Image (cartoon, rainbow, N blue to C red):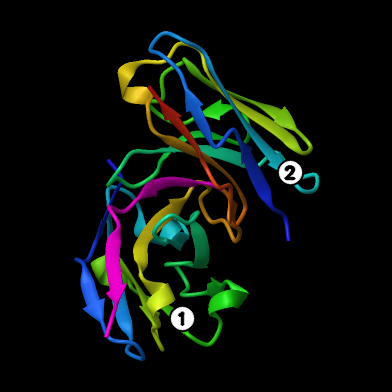
C-alpha cells in the first residue's frame, strides 16, 4: 500500500510569511493528489485537486505542484485564517498532516 | 450550494451497531459517489468505502469488510453507513464526502464534506 508522509509535522510561521508543505509518496502516484485544510472541530475543506487545481472559492495564495512521489502545497503569504492543519490525499490514502501554527 | 448534513452524535456499547446518515442537497443526488471516512482522536483520516447513489453499488475498504454496510434512500437523497461489532477503537468522527468527479467509480478527491458525526464506543 502507498504511504503518504507529510513534512514537517509542525510549521511555525508568522502572518505574511510563505509556507511550504511537503507530501511524499512511498511510490510513484498519479496526478490525482489533493490537499485539504482542517480547523479544529470542522470538517476538512478541499483546497487543491489533481495536484495543482484550486477548488472553487480557494484564494490564489494557495498553490500545488509536484509529480511522481513529491508534492508541495505552497501558501504564498499567510493570512490569520490559514493557521490550521493541512493534509494530502491520494485515492483512498491520507497523509498524517502538517500543522501550520503562529 | 452542495450540502451534506449528517446525523447527530451517538454513544454505543462494545458489540453494538451504529447507523450514520448523510443527507445531500444542492446537486443531483444520483450523479456523484459518496464516500465515508473516519478520523479517530490524533489519527489520520481513514477511508472506509463508497456508495454510488444511482445504482447502489458499493466498495468497502478491506479493513471493514464484513462489518460495514452502505445503503441509500434515493427519494430522500440520503445515504447510510452501518458499522457493526463496535469496539473502542471505532470511537471517531465519521464523515461523508462527495467525490469530485461525476459518475466516478474511484476515490478521486472529496469536494464537499458533511459536518461529521462523533461516534463514541464505551461500556
Q: Which residues are magenta?
A: B109-123
Q: Is residue B113 magenta?
A: yes
Disc 2 target residue = A30
Question: Is residue B7 rendered to the left or right of residue A37?
Answer: left
Question: Is residue B43 rendered to the left or right of residue A82?
Answer: right
Q: Chain of mark 2?
A: A
Residue B83 percent location from the top left of the image: 40, 80
Q: How many marks?
A: 2
What's the magenta bit mostly, secondary-structure-wise? strand
Residue B74 percent location from the top left of the image: 32, 70
Reply above or below: B99 against B15: above
| Residue drawn 41% across the image and 54% down it | B97
Q: Is residue B22 visible?
A: no
Disc 1 target residue = B68
Mark 1 on the same chain as mark 2: no
| Residue drawn 41% across the image and 19% down it | A59
| Residue in front for this viewpoint, B64 or B102 | B64
| Residue drawn 57% across the image and 39% down it | A34
Q: CA distance from mark 1 to mark 2?
A: 28 Å
State which quarter of the image contains the C terminus of chain A.
top left
Reply above or below: B118 against A93: below
* SS label for mark 2: loop
Q: Is residue A99 magenta?
A: no
State which quarter of the image contains the N terminus of chain A.
bottom right
Q: Chain of mark 1?
A: B
Residue B64 percent location from the top left of the image: 53, 78
Residue A6 percent location from the top left of the image: 61, 39
Q: Is residue B17 visible?
A: yes
Badge 2, how many Cα within 10 Å: few under 14, some, many 20+? few
Badge 1, how many Cα within 10 Å: few under 14, some, many 20+? some
Amino acid at each position: 500500500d502507498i504511504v503518504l508522509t507529510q513534512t514537517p509535522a509542525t510549521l511555525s510561521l508568522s502572518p505574511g510569511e510563505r509556507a511550504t508543505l511537503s507530501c511524499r509518496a512511498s511510490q510513484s502516484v498519479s496526478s490525482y493528489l489533493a490537499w485539504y485544510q482542517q480547523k479544529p472541530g470542522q470538517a476538512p475543506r478541499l483546497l487543491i485537486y489533481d495536484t495543482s487545481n484550486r477548488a472553487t472559492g480557494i484564494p490564489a495564495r494557495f498553490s500545488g505542484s509536484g509529480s511522481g512521489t513529491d508534492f508541495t502545497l505552497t501558501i504564498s503569504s499567510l493570512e490569520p485564517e490559514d493557521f490550521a492543519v493541512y493534509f494530502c490525499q491520494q485515492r483512498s490514502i491520507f497523509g498524517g498532516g502538517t500543522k501550520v501554527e503562529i | 450550494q452542495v450540502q451534506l448534513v449528517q446525523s447527530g452524535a451517538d454513544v454505543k456499547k462494545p458489540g453494538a451497531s451504529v447507523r450514520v446518515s448523510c443527507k445531500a442537497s444542492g446537486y443531483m443526488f444520483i450523479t456523484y459517489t459518496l464516500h465515508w471516512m473516519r478520523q479517530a482522536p490524533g489519527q489520520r483520516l481513514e477511508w472506509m468505502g463508497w456508495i454510488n447513489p444511482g445504482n447502489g453499488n458499493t466498495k468497502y475498504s478491506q479493513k471493514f469488510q464484513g462489518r460495514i454496510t452502505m445503503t441509500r434512500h434515493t427519494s430522500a437523497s440520503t445515504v447510510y453507513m452501518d458499522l457493526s461489532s463496535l469496539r473502542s477503537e471505532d470511537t471517531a468522527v465519521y464523515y461523508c464526502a462527495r467525490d469530485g468527479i461525476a459518475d466516478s467509480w474511484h476515490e478521486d478527491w472529496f469536494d464537499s464534506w458533511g459536518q461529521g458525526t462523533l461516534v463514541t464506543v464505551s461500556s
